[in-house]
Image (spheres, helix red, strand yellow):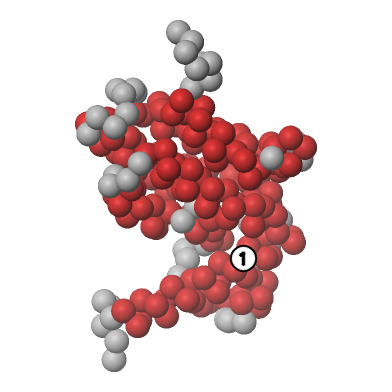
Amino acid sequence: MFSDQDPIRQQLIEARRNQILDAAASVFAEEGFHRATTKEIASRAGIAEGTIYNYFESKDDLLIGLMSRLAELETLDDELTEALQGDARDFFVAMFRRRVEHMVEGQETLQAILPEVLVNADLRERYYQRYVLRIAEMLEQYVRTRIELGHIRPVDASLATRAVQAMFVGLLVLRILGDETVVERWETLPELLATIIFDGLRAEGGE
């Protein structure tokens, strides 16, 4: 009999969650979030429909789960703690690059679910609280710690964090809209953003 803390049980739970999320991503991308049903998702996953509710509260919860997985939300806190031992710029580039790659892989799913987030007030609030705000709070603490350690100059950590989030979201939207410059030079964006954030746009030697 497995205990709640048994690592094997946790692995099995995580595997089942990912199985369901994979199916949800596929169905959302094909049908759109609004038309997709948990019955179809369960069929795609090869499980009974009721099994979904052992792992997710609702279809909305599946959406939040997909976004969290794309952003690797569950590992972000540990990444930020570990990153304090290294260079802030190098960490920014690596983290941004890894996450934009995941977002591109899930672009069709994002196109299907983002409109629903924008028009559904309840879902928008859950999305903000469980996804956007959690990321903002973790990044904000990271920036504050870097400031305390003297690694970066004092700035408004709350606004700086949200400015970085806004750049990321804005570029993702431009890619979804098919902006040729963004699509063609997507791989160069992490380094460019790091230059803008850490070095600014002022010419060398300029005042």
Quarter of the picture holding the N terminus: bottom left
Specify whether 139 is left or right of 126: left
The residue tagged 1 is: 24
Q: Position of residue 109 (x, y in %)?
A: 66, 56
Which quadrant of the structure image shows residue 87? top left
Residue type indicated by callout 1: Ala
Q: In the image shown, does 195 or 6 lie closer to the viewer?
A: 195
Q: Position of residue 102 (x, y in %)?
A: 57, 55
Residue at the front extreme?
205
Specify whether 187 is left or right of 179: left
The answer to whether 100 is drawn above or below residue 161 in the figure is: below
At 49% from the left edge and 76% from the top edge, which residue is drawn?
16
The answer to whether 168 is drawn above or below residue 160 in the figure is: below
Q: Position of residue 78 (x, y in %)?
A: 32, 55
At 63% from the left edge and 56% from the top edge, which residue is drawn?
106
At 53% from the left edge and 16% from the top edge, which residue is drawn?
203
